[in-house]
Amino acid sequence: MNLTDEEKIELLRIARRSITSVVNGGELPEVMPSTENLKTPCGAFVTITINDNLRGCIGYVEAVKPLAETVNEVAAKAALEDPRFPPVEPYEVENLEIEISVLSPLRPVKSVDEIKIGEHGIMIKKGWRRGLLLPQVAIEHNLTRDEFLEHTCLKAGLPPDCWKSEGTEIYIFSAIIFKESDFKQKMSEKL
């Protein structure tokens, strides 16, 4: 899927409206996607930061709902339900930076050599445990491929070297990643 700048801006506005509403005690806003891309089921994550510090990140790997609805829902969850952080407070909303990652379908790998740092995110599954790291995590933390795999194992609650074990499934995906600051001027126009 390719997204136009206008579609990216629409998704960012959907995410911001969702967060603003639920953080202030309101309901999840209704979304009316304007294009076929935004009506297409797709996995997505919303990452919230304040001053480059993570404040929440939640998403769906699988394409369970239309993209616009997925973003609407996971934005609210990232603000209120990320177990690593207390819920976002109303006074924080104006300082939030919202980043959206629209995911490609997962693809199993035959060899870890297929993993390209900066291009792929990883999901590791073993038994009922699974962990996922978005492509940008490896870049932001300057991780090697092996370190990226180890961190993904740890995210799943598994030993860091579980990616070498039999029975561990490794999947890769790519993502279209964009954030509000990419569209600062257009984002400041009336929502």
Image (tube, rainbow, N blue to C red):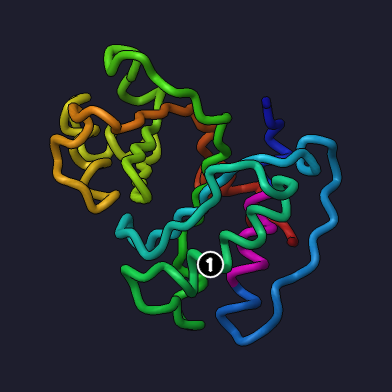
Residue 162 appears at what percent x and percent y? 19, 36
Q: Quadrant of residue 67?
A: top right
Quadrant that contains the C terminus: bottom right
Please report the bounds of the magenta region as a residue range: 10-19
Query: Viewer-proximal residue, 55 or 151?
Result: 151
Magenta includes 15? yes
Query: Viewer-proximal residue, 44 or 142?
Result: 44
Query: Viewer-proximal residue, 68 or 42?
Result: 42
At 47% from the left edge and 57% from the top edge, which residue is drawn?
58
- Element type where label 1 sits in the image: helix
Q: Quadrant of residue 122?
A: top left
Residue 11 appears at what percent x and percent y? 67, 49
Q: Is residue 108 above or below residue 68?
A: above
Residue denoted by label 1: 77
At 28% from the left edge and 12% from the top edge, which residue is drawn?
113
Tag 1: Cα neighbours inside 10 Å, few (<14), some, or many (≥20)?
A: many
Query: Viewer-proximal residue, 28 or 156?
Result: 156
Residue 149 appears at what percent x and percent y? 23, 33
At 72% from the left edge and 41% from the top edge, which residue is drawn?
41
Residue 47 appears at what percent x and percent y? 45, 54
Left or right of 126 in this view: 15: right
Left or right of 78 in this view: 142: left
Residue type marked 1: Lys
Left or right of 140 in this view: 12: right
Quadrant that contains the N terminus: top right
At 65% from the left edge and 68% from the top edge, which residue is drawn?
18
Magenta includes 188? no
Q: Is residue 180 above or below residue 82?
A: above
Q: Main secondary structure of the magenta part?
A: helix
